[in-house]
Image (cartoon, rainbow, N blue to C red):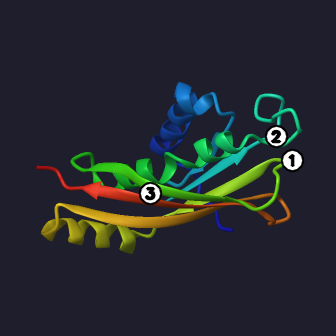
Amino acid sequence: MIRVKESFESRMWRWGGNLFPAYRRVGARVTYVSPDFCEVHVKIPNTWRTRNHLGITWGGGLYSALDPIYGVMIYKLLGYRHRVVDKCADIEFKKPVTTTVYARFQLSRAEIEGIRSCLESNPKVERSYRVDLVDRAGTVHVSCLKTLCILSSP
């Protein structure tokens, strides 16, 4: 995995996201934001703050860590004239999370340009993105499919 050094702006975006109270409370941390904002990495540790009485990470906390990332990325990449809202999400808990897990969110420039061109002729566009939470060994513990609705500005 090639990881380009964060820019000052992407580092500030990462710090701000980690300090945002609603995100901070779930125990997740954004660990990397690429300079072009097309890639974001998230880490969810299994600590006393994130696990339940069985020693596994709360499912709600796992989803909360994944929930805002693609929407915020698209909002940032398209420009602030558009609105990005959740339409639906499908989350599959494949294996209990007892260790730290990681997620990698990626969008291509072609995807963003495709959304932009669709918005020129349509007032809204829907896109779905899959993200997995994996441990260090690469075992998928959680798989989430997010569907977002992107609305053009009036």
Q: Are marks 2 and 1 in contact (CB under 8 Å)?
A: yes
**Disc 3 designates what residue?**
36
Q: Residues within 10 Å of mark 3 (few under 14, many from 20)?
A: some
For the residue marked with disc 2, what is the amino acid? Asn
Residue 37 seen in the figure: no
What is the x, y in percent for residue 66? 58, 49
Q: Residue furthest left?
A: 154
Secondary structure beneath dot 3 equals loop
Sequence-earlier tag: 1 or 3 = 3
Residue displayed at 65% across by 33% down: 26
Horizontal arrangement in the rendering, residue 112 relative to residue 58 (left or right): left
Q: Can you give x and y, in whole percent of width and height, for residue 3 in the image?
A: 63, 61
Q: Position of residue 86 (x, y in %)?
A: 40, 51
What is the quadrant of the N terminus in the image? bottom right
Q: Which residue is mark 2?
A: 46
- Given the image, on which type of amino acid does mark 3 rest? Asp
Amino acid type at circle 1 is Thr
Q: Are marks 1 and 3 in contact (CB under 8 Å)?
A: no
Residue 132 lies, in percent from the top left, at 66, 62
Residue that appears at 70% across and 45% down: 59
Cβ–Cβ under 8 Å for marks 3 and 2: no
Q: Mark 1 and mark 3: span between their CA atoms?
A: 33 Å
Residue 149 is drawn in which quadrant?
bottom left
Q: Is residue 73 above or below residue 13?
A: below
Please name the residue that numbered disc 1 is placed on: 98
Residue pictured at 85% horizontal, 48% vertical: 99
Mark 1 secondary-structure assignment = loop
Q: Is residue 20 left or right of residue 100?
A: left
